[in-house]
Image: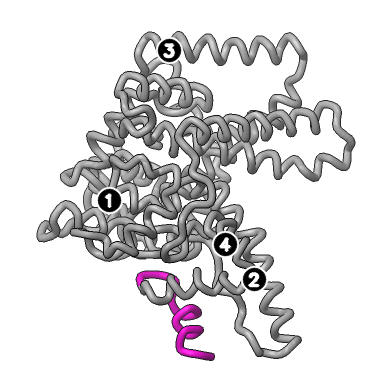
Amino acid sequence: MTQIDERISTSKVDQPDASTAIRASFQRFPRWTQHLWTWITGKALPGQKPLVKLNVVTYVILDLVGLAVGIGSAWWIVSSGPTIALLLLPLCWVVTVSAARICSTVIAHHCMHTRFTGKIKYDREIAQVLSTLVCTEDADQYYEDHINLHHRKETFATIADPTIQHLLKLGFRPGMTVPALWRRLAFTVVSPMFHAEFLATRLAQNLWRSATYRRIMSLAYLGAVIGLVTWQGAWLPFALAVLVPMIPLYQIVALLEFLSEHAWFKAKDDTLGGRAFHVSHSWGRFNGDALPEQGIGVVRSVGAWSRWTLRLAFYHLPSRILVVPGDLAAHDFHHRKPSTFEWVRASYARQADIDAGHPKWPAYTDVWGLGVAIDRVFTILSEEEESSWELVRAEGPLVAAE
């Protein structure tokens, strides 16, 4: 193996040269495919410019079309499609969950930062409509949790951060071993209690913990949906086309996203300034493996490419589409530049910032592979003391921060 191959195989995090080499290995594919690989991996090539410059309006239109296609296709398959078409149902779920997550964690999120129209009033209203559509946290509470708590240096990744409270309530506690944390994750994603509490919190945030106009909007919307389904007697298509992707699958990928996003339980270093502190707790989450080596013989090459293809199809691509869609792969760029309108092309904007030397900021950290990112969080959590757990255990219902 060459030195560059050794760097790629032995490190998936923290080494800029290794990260650059992983993405550069994709240049062995035709040049016209490179924008596709940028979308899949979440990482752009140095100097690469976006092929199509979407604006915020086309971005949200495309997402809503995706949501309609995912639900509509699944509904048709269940209600009148041929039996063989049931094999495509999981693909419909993937499209639906991804579009729903983009609604809440990408578009509504940037509305909270007034990065949609640039007008607070309009952006807040757009966030209310989108969060009602997918039954997630109302905009007022989202603003409090995300802007006033999550983004403030004093509370970011501390016990006051809603996401840390969420994870603690789910049993991800400081001092647990990494294997025990992975077992806790496996148990949680199939736990009826986790899904019931998460759903109850989502409904509460729509129907009785929000402002009056939001409660009326949510009641009208959910009432109309349930009334129409009951009138049509379409409970089976509704359950399989809407409820399955929008409740258990949505909630599983939300948890995976939370657990890979930041160094949630990393001890606070008071010597770090605001910028350095955010950087120390954030990273890019990229998806892909370096292409197999060249010149290794036919048999080894077939095995290596088979493994590479299977990991891409069943691990990296689902991670990108479901867990880190939109700009979530480059979420660390958002914490550096929360006021940018470049979130619609974040992978390219992040790389442009790296190309410019990331002025006044420390270097970026790249993590390749969702499992590596989660393991990174678990390792940090395992090294901390169990202090602060008692502070949140009795604080009430599950927090469903987005």
Q: CA distance from mark 4 to mark 3?
A: 45 Å
Near mark 2 (Cα within 10 A), the count class, few <14, some 14-19 or many ≥20, is: some
Q: CA distance from mark 2 to mark 4?
A: 17 Å
Give the residues drawn in magenta, as a range.
Answer: 1-14
Q: CA distance from mark 3 to mark 2?
A: 48 Å
Residue drawn at (43%, 12%) of the image: 215
Mark 2 vs mark 4, foreground winner is 4
Image coordinates for residue 47, horizontal then vertical, percent: 42, 63
N-term mark: 4 or 3: 4
Residue drawn at (25%, 44%) of the image: 390
Element type where label 3 sits in the image? helix
Query: As drawn, is 195 to the left or to the right of 13?
Result: right
The relative height of residue 331 versus residue 200 in the rendered view (above or below) is below
Image coordinates for residue 283, horizontal then vertical, percent: 35, 59
Q: Which mark is residue 34?
A: 4
Mark 1 vs mark 2, foreground winner is 1
Near mark 4 (Cα within 10 A), the count class, few <14, some 14-19 or many ≥20, is: some
Mark 1 vs mark 3, foreground winner is 1
Disc 1 target residue: 336
Disc 3 target residue: 215
N-term mark: 1 or 4: 4
Q: Quadrant of residue 113?
A: top left
Q: Can residue 193 be seen here?
A: no
Q: Quadrant of residue 393?
A: top left
Element type where label 1 sits in the image? helix
Q: Quadrant of residue 342?
A: top left
Disc 2 target residue: 308
Q: CA distance from mark 1 to mark 3?
A: 34 Å
Contact check, label 4 and label 3, Cβ < 8 Å: no
N-term mark: 2 or 4: 4
